[in-house]
Structure formats: C-alpha cells, structure tokens
Image: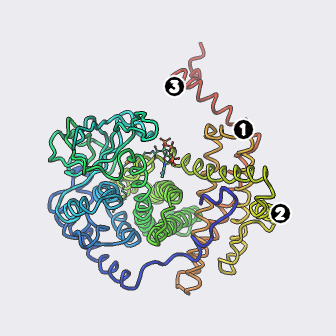
Amino acid sequence: MANIFRGSLMCKHVFPYPDVLTTEQKEFTNSLINPFERFFLGVNDAVRNDDNSKIDENTLTALWELGAFGIQVPVDYGGLGLNNTQYGRLCQIVGANDLGLGITIGAHQSIGFKGILLYGTPEQKAKYLPMVSSGKVYAAFALTEPSSGSDAGSIRCRAVKNNNYYILNGSKIWISNGGIADIMTVFAQTEQVDKKTGQKKDKVTAFIVERSFGGVSHGPPEKKMGIKASNTAEVYFEDVKIPIENVLGKEGDGFKVAMNILNNGRFGMGATLSGTMKRCIDIATAHANNRAQFGQKLKNYGSIKEKLAQMSILHYATESMAFTISQIMDSGSQDYHLEAAISKIYASESAWYVCDEAIQILGGMGFMKEAGVERILRDLRIFRIFEGTNDILRLFVALTGIQYAGSHLTDLQRAFKNPSANLGLIFKEASRRAASSIGLGGVDLNSHVVAELKPYAKNTAVCINVFGQTVEELLLKYKKNIVNEQFVLNCLANAAIDIYAMVVTQSRSSRAFSLQLTTAEHELNLTKALTIQASERALRNLRNATSKNSEALTKKMSSIAQTVCENNGVVCTGVLDLN
Ligand code: MYA
C-alpha cells in the first residue's frame, strides 16, 4: 500500500489472490471448526457471560481443552501450531458467537504473549509458551497508562537496572485480562546510554513480568459498555524485581516491540469481525425473509434490499482484506503494517455499520435483548477505539505512506542535481509520468483481473494514479508541515482504504471466477458494486485533499472547534433564550 502514495502498486502482492495453505493445513483447520462450533453451541453462553460480566470456570476449562488459548503456539510448546490464516479462520467462529469471550482469548494470544512468539529467546519460549498455551496461565499486554493512550511513546512506568535485575514501578490502565493474567508483556522507560556520545536517554524496554515476582497487583474489573465477559483492570507494579533475562527484544527497543506486536495482531480483528458481520447479516436476512408488513415480505422492499446488499459488500471486503494480510504474513512478508492498520479501521467501522443496519432491519425487535444484536452492537463499539484508535491509525497510514513517497521525491531531487550519474532513476520516473499523462497510467490492473472486471480495475488504476499525483502536489504545497494537516491526511487515508478494498475484492472475485466457484457471479457483483462506490469516494477524497473549497471548509471547521473549546461546549444562544 505504501506504493500507492507514489502512484504505483506492487501487483504481485495482491494478485492472484493468495492461497497459502497446503491441503494438510486446510484439512487440519477444518477438523478444528466442528469442535469450536460445538463449544459455542453447547458449552458457551454469550448472554450469560454478558449478564454476569464474566466467563464461568467450566467454560474456560473447555476453552483450554480446545487449545483455544494457544492457537498459534508451535506444537512443541503445547499449542495448536496454526499459522495466521488458520488462526483467522477460527477467529471468524469466535467473532460470530461471542466477542467478549473473543477478547479474553484474543488479548491473551494476539498481543498478551505474542511478543514471546515474535521476540522471545529460546529460553523465554521454552519457559513461558507451554504455560500460556496449555498450562492455564493467562497473559496480558500492558502498554496503556493514565497519561499515555494513543501516545504510546510517552509512558511513565519506569524500570531501573540494578545488577542482574530491573526494578519496575508504575501503573497501567484498561488492561484486558489485567485481573487474571499471571504473565504480562510490560513496557517501561529505562535509562539507556548512547554508545557513541555517552549521553543518557530514556527509552522504552519490553519485559516479561510474572505476577509471582511480587509487587504486582490489580484493581477491580472495570464496568464497561460491552465485551463485558472479558476482564479489564488497572495493574500496579511496586518494586517488581524483574531478572534481566526477562527483557523482551533488545533493551531500549520496546517501542518497536510494542508496535510490531500490535501490527502482527491487527489482521485478527478483521477476521474476527468478518465472523461477527456474517452473524448479523444472517439474523437480518432471516428476519427480512420471514417478516411481512403492508402485505409483503420485507425482503421485497427496495430499502431492505439496499441495506442487505451494502452489508454483504462490506462483509466481503472485510474478509478479503483480513485473509489477504494473513496470507501475506504467512508467506513471510514483514511489510504489512499499513495493510493491517487499514484492515483494522475498515473491519471495525464496517462491523459497526452492519450490526446497526441489522438492528434497523429488525426494527423494535432489534432493540430488545432477546434478538441478540444489541449485545453485539455494545461489544463492537470498542473495536474502533482499542488496538490503536481508528483516528490515530488513519494518521499513521497517511503519514507512513507520505514518508515513503517523500523519500522517493527526495531521491529524485538529489538525482536531478547530478543527472548524468542518475540517468536510470530519472528515465524510469520520466517514463512513468509520460505514460500517466497520456492515460496509460503507471498501474495496470487489467492483466490481473477477469474480463468482466476490467472496466472496474481501470477505475481503480485511475484512483491510484490520481493518488500519486495528489500526494506529490500536497508534498510540494505543505512540505514537512503536511504532518499538521490532519483534515488532508484523513482524506488520503480514506482514499487509501477504499483503494485497498477495491484491489483485494477484485483479486478474490477473479480467483472465484477462475476456479468456477458456484458463488463467483455473486462475488463479482459484490466487487463491482464496491468498486463503483469506492472509486467515486476515493476520487472525491483526493479532490478534497487539494481543493480550495475543502481548504476553506477546513478553516471554518477549525475555527468552530476552537470557539467550542474556548467556551467549554456549545456556543449558540438557545432559541428560547433571546431576552
Ligand atoms: S493495547 C493498546 C493499544 N495502543 C495503541 O495501539 C497505541 C497507538 N499508538 C501508536 O500506535 C503510536 O504511538 C503511533 C506513533 C502510531 C501514534 N509499526 O515518531 P513516531 C515507528 C512499525 O511516529 P509516535 C489495546 O488496545 C516509526 O516508523 N513502526 O511515534 C488492547 C518510527 O520509526 P523510526 C512504527 O508519534 C486491546 C518510530 O516508530 C509503527 O510516538 C485488546 C517512532 O514513530 C508501527 N505501527 O507514535 C485487543 N508506529 O524511528 C484484543 C510507529 O525508525 C484484540 N513506528 O523512524 C483481539 C482481537 C482479536 C480477537 C481474536 C479472537 C480469537
């Protein structure tokens, strides 16, 4: 995705739609689907978990026995040994049934001990992975602090080195599994000495902390709007003695460790929420098929058709994104952070929309607990906030992409200072621009999609070309100050998200057609409808990023917000308060 900021696309990363599982892996995954579904039908009770704000011991024991706490831990360490794609398939089942329970197992493995899987030494892996995969020991990821939410680098927890130990003090808030975890990945400031300059500087280090080290305590379970079944608590560290061998990754590298754990887990949210969306669509469809009003089944009304179609489009794109990313990761790519952030944003917003529309289709019934969708809506709300708020992730997507495009422009500027030595680079860029100016464009998606998608792929290619031109224009206009132009950055992020949705669905439905799947025609229709919507929206966002009108609007909006803040709230005279 970084490439679209330069007006190009690495097609080989998305076309053909990846298919990484061997037959054996597919069979093993399928063999786990039944036991997981049986657990949700026969053992787990999502309503009871929600009502009690906890999961009972019998249910948790059954989950441990299923292997649900160590899905990606290698078999040698006591886990199921699944890769990301196989994990994603199981996440869908969890997401379809109980998001609160999903957070208990997700916070445990998607981020809680993921650092040990990604960065652990052989000794750390041998010691901790068996406990957390089959030893009934819960894990948590402790990053957030009272004064450090989105600004993850500003944490205040501090660990001071004392011979072979670090002494940790501080506190964390809103930690999923914080009240039940005995193993935690904790991030704290540590003093580091620059080897070259000798200067001392605080840098974040990641630690594996055992509750048994002493000095670890927690607050009561937080009372929440949703995902009530999961435990969320404050965690306090008072003179916790951490052996130096429990540093995770390198000393001072904790910020990158934290970011990479989050990057690595984000696709799981997309997979999980595609399961949730499917459940909402199933409930809404059953209602539309059965409920008659004004002498007609709801399914025959245009407004209901529009809703069900839109819900299906969003589900298709969410699922296509999640499994593109999981499979790219399984193929060994380390470069998926933009895609993972895009997928998290898209999935959490689409799932919210789909669930809300399901409630709308059910009408008054949807508002009643009995229908089971109001719980899903409450559970879904947090997904736009945690694991990086969507607002922060939009800025992350736009700024990371711009940095990539900017470095290319800097290379070009440098190349022009000494053209004879850089002819290759200059010639390549000149050809790209010439092609683009005569409508050929730098991107050719046509050769990757089936015939009936070619006009749609062409529209997407146009969006990518305009994207590159827009970024260049913005960089020339704002230079480094682009980082402060959040309205503009949001336009770019939104266009990037739409482009990714178009590309992954075109890839997946082309594969469906080539394989002559019975669903191929429907998948092509979903893709075509999505492309019509997404390409128009992407071009509108790109226009807005540079237009004078939008600039004027942005200024007005900023001024309104400033007045509201200065007055601590709404600033108009009440209609009835004129005298
Ligand atoms: S856990 C809490 C989640 N918290 C967050 O996500 C915090 C969000 N904040 C951030 O991500 C960062 O602070 C941001 C950067 C992005 C704002 N990948 O100067 P910088 C590099 C790789 O921009 P800052 C929770 O909610 C960057 O390139 N690298 O940093 C659990 C630079 O490198 P260099 C990255 O302005 C909920 C350096 O870092 C990334 O301070 C439970 C500094 O960058 C990145 N992403 O802030 C969930 N970002 O120096 C359970 C930055 O080399 C879910 N960098 O140039 C389970 C769901 C699934 C269920 C499953 C069922 C089975």
Q: In the image, which is nearer the foreground, mark 1 or mark 3? A: 1
**Structural crowding at the residue carrying mark 1, measured as other residues with C-alpha within 10 Å and reported as few (<14), some (14–19) or many (≥20):** some
Q: Could you tell whether 175 is left or right of 537 in the image?
A: left
Q: In the image, which is nearer the foreground, mark 1 or mark 2? A: 2
Sequence order check: which comes first, mark 1 or mark 3?
Answer: 1
Sequence order check: which comes first, mark 3 or mark 2?
Answer: 2
Q: Is residue 292 visible?
A: no
Tell me where residue 225 appears, x and y as whole percent: 34, 45
Disc number for residue 579:
none
Q: Nearer the viewer, residue 262 or 209?
A: 209
In the picture, the quarter occupied by the N terminus is bottom right
Count the numbered circles shown. 3
Disc 2 residue type (three-letter): Ala
| Marks 3/2: CA–CA distance | 52 Å
User: Which element carries disc 3, helix, strand or loop?
Assistant: loop
Q: In the image, which is nearer the foreground, mark 3 or mark 2? A: 2
User: Which element carries disc 1, helix, strand or loop?
Assistant: helix
* Label pair 3/2, CB-CB below 8 angstroms: no
Residue at 42 percent of width and 79 percent of height? 21
In the picture, the quarter occupied by the C terminus is top right
Disc 1 residue type (three-letter): Glu
Give the residue number, with chain letter if any, for mark 1: 551
Tell me where residue 552 appears, x and y as whole percent: 73, 35
Q: Is residue 507 visible?
A: yes
Tell me where residue 209 appears, x and y as whole percent: 23, 48
Q: Nearer the viewer, residue 263 or 232?
A: 263
Q: Nearer the viewer, residue 415 or 46?
A: 415
Give the residue number, with chain letter if any, for mark 2: 434
**Structural crowding at the residue carrying mark 2, measured as other residues with C-alpha within 10 Å and reported as few (<14), some (14–19) or many (≥20):** some
Give the residue number, with chain letter if any, for mark 3: 569
Kindly give the residue lying farthest to the top in the view shown: 579
Residue at 71 percent of width and 67 percent of height? 443
